[in-house]
Amino acid sequence: MKVGCPVCGASAVRPYRVVEGYQYYECEVCDSLFIDPNVIAEMDAGRPIRAYDQAYWAAESKESRERSFGPALSRVAETLLYARLPVRRFLDIGTGPGFLLDALSTYLPVSRDMFWGIEQFPPEQHTKHPNYTIGALSDLPGTFQAGVCIEVIEHLTPAMLRGLTAALAPKSEPNSIYLFNTGLSSFVKKENLHYLDPVRRGHIVSWGLAGLARLFEEQDFRVTPLPGKSWAFVAEYRPTPSDIPFDQRIWHPVEANKKILHDPVMGSHMFVVGIDTARAYR
């Protein structure tokens, strides 16, 4: 059987490895790793390997909360420093139980109302934050200037990710920026082979940066890798040229965004976290 890459369409594809009985393939063109395209077709038809039901959330909630009150806060802080426009509304895409909204309410209480979360498959127990929204991106009002998407797109087929970017584009403004936290193919190959996990966690794709760049460009997003972070990248919507190199943006943040990270109640903790996490892992 001839296999083509569902990410970029290339025919230069070879078997990568078998995980829990599922064959994964590697694209030699866009560097993505993906589960058997027949499985991907089944998922696109509404028949997933792993249902995101209450049993899933019962297994994942503890880890989700730990991540939200730890690394995810760092991702939010550095995203605010990278942003090239004042951030009035910040979105957590695929927020799950909404623990990140709760964490941000704790660490940036004065700015609590600017943070939003969207979730299509909510657990029964979730945050009471007023901006927690159940549904699709298209259900959200207004536009967003920044956001994060933490441990989500490894669960999505290429068609699903295309749908996400198509829905995110009209919710964005020129220079809106989103940080995606996901185990890229270089991370899987060099650091964590077990990240591919189709049955328990539903990880069916490990994206290559070349594949992501091509896919996001279809909706006018520019993908930028983060130095040293083989598990994250940023996507900016219709970015304008800048004289400041990306890795120097943290030293020239938009003043309004810097002010968000200097919370009158909690102090400058989140600003320091953002600076340090942006410089880490290099």
Image (cartoon, rainbow, N blue to C red):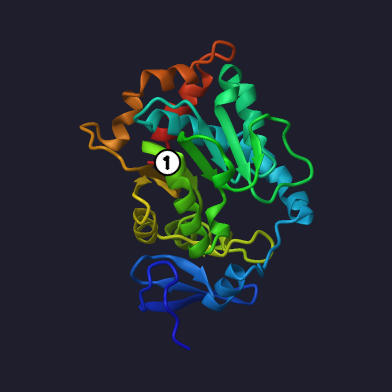
Residue 201 vertical placement versus 26 (above, below): above
Location of residue 225 in the rendering, given as x and y in whole percent from the top left corner:
36, 47
> Which element carries disc 1, helix, strand or loop?
loop
User: Residue 244 is drawn in which quadrant?
Assistant: top left
Q: Is residue 197 visible?
A: yes
Q: Nearer the viewer, residue 67 or 144?
A: 144
Residue 179 vertical placement versus 164 (above, below): above
User: Residue 23 is drawn in which quadrant?
Assistant: bottom right
Residue at 64%, 23% (x, y): give it. Answer: 106
Query: Badge 1 is on which residue?
Result: 281
Residue at 38%, 72% (x, y): give it. Answer: 9
Location of residue 190 in the rendering, given as x and y in whole percent from the top left corner:
45, 59
Q: Residues within 10 Å of mark 1 (few under 14, many from 20)?
A: few
Q: Nearer the viewer, residue 38 or 189?
A: 38
Q: Amino acid at mark 1?
A: Tyr
Location of residue 217 in the rendering, given as x and y in whole percent from the top left corner:
34, 54
Residue at 46%, 41% (x, y): give it. Answer: 171
Instruction: Name the quadrant of the C terminus.
Output: top left
Side of 123 relative to 187 (left or right): right
Side of 272 relative to 45 (left or right): left
Q: Residue furthest left?
A: 243
Residue 42 vertical placement versus 111 (above, below): below
Residue 251 vertical placement versus 68 (above, below): above
Q: Is residue 18 visible?
A: no
